[in-house]
Amino acid sequence: MAQPSTPLAVVGSKYCISEFPVDLVIVRKAEALTAGNLIVTDILENVMFKLEVQWSLHDRRILLDPAGNPVVTLRQKIRTLHGRWQVFRGDSHDEKDLLFTAKTSSWAQFKTKMAVFLTNNMKQEVPDFSLEGSYSERSYIVYSGDGQSKSILAQMHKNIGSTMKSILLGKDNFIVTVYPNVDYAFIVALIAILDNINTTDEIMHASTATAATSSLLLLS
């Protein structure tokens, strides 16, 4: 399993740690279904990032550092369930601050693929990074390139064993292991996009179930 030997910085080199993998705890807040907010901590429960949602024509999600400073802004370019996202530096949505574009698609039931293109990849024929798996099963892998090389940059897990405090292992929480020299802020931005897709799915399924129940009550 090949991994980068030099820092692979997308958001910034300060988010690349060369000595060891970084385990991030993704905590989905109870109100995530309506607010979409996430908190990202380390395994000692120190907050590393928070996700703030701003509802608008183009839903914006801003990834903040512990001091509340914007790290990146995620913007859905096409208002569809599985569409295109643009990620900008800081709280900008100016093209000059564009870091990368992500295109998502469903390829099987509850499975999602994501192709990620850096700004200088103008043709967007081959992705710079790819991601595939199941969010509901908390099973995702981030690859370099189109994934054919099987160079793994990060992996999502349901848990990492008995070393974790039980409070961090709630049913809506999970772990992402980011391998050495990989930009962990970049990985968190990808997870935030996946969470939006999953949250939208949950809202739609809940609405469908409610409508079906109401119809049955009317017929009874």
Image: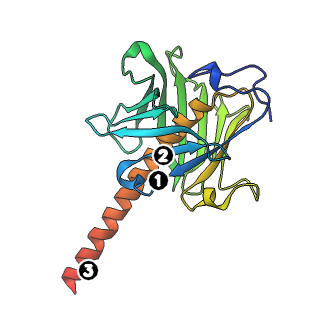
- Give percent across and percent down for residue 198: 46, 51
Which residue corresponds to mark 1?
Answer: 29
Most foreground residue, 139 or 51: 51
Q: Dots 1 and 2: beta carbons under 8 Å?
A: yes
What's the CA distance linking mark 1 and mark 3?
Answer: 32 Å
Residue beneath the point at 67% across and 22% down: 8
User: What SS does tag 1 mark?
Assistant: loop
| Residue kind at label 2, given as amino acid type | Leu
Does residue 156 show up?
Answer: yes
Query: Which mark lies nearer to you, 2 or 3?
Result: 2
Which residue corresponds to mark 3?
Answer: 216
Q: Quadrant of the N terminus?
A: top right
User: What SS does tag 3 mark?
Assistant: helix
Examine the rendered structure and indicate whether residue 137 appears above or below residue 9. Answer: below
What's the CA distance linking mark 1 and mark 2?
Answer: 6 Å
Which residue corresponds to mark 2?
Answer: 38
Does residue 108 show up?
Answer: no
- Give percent across and percent down for residue 129: 61, 29
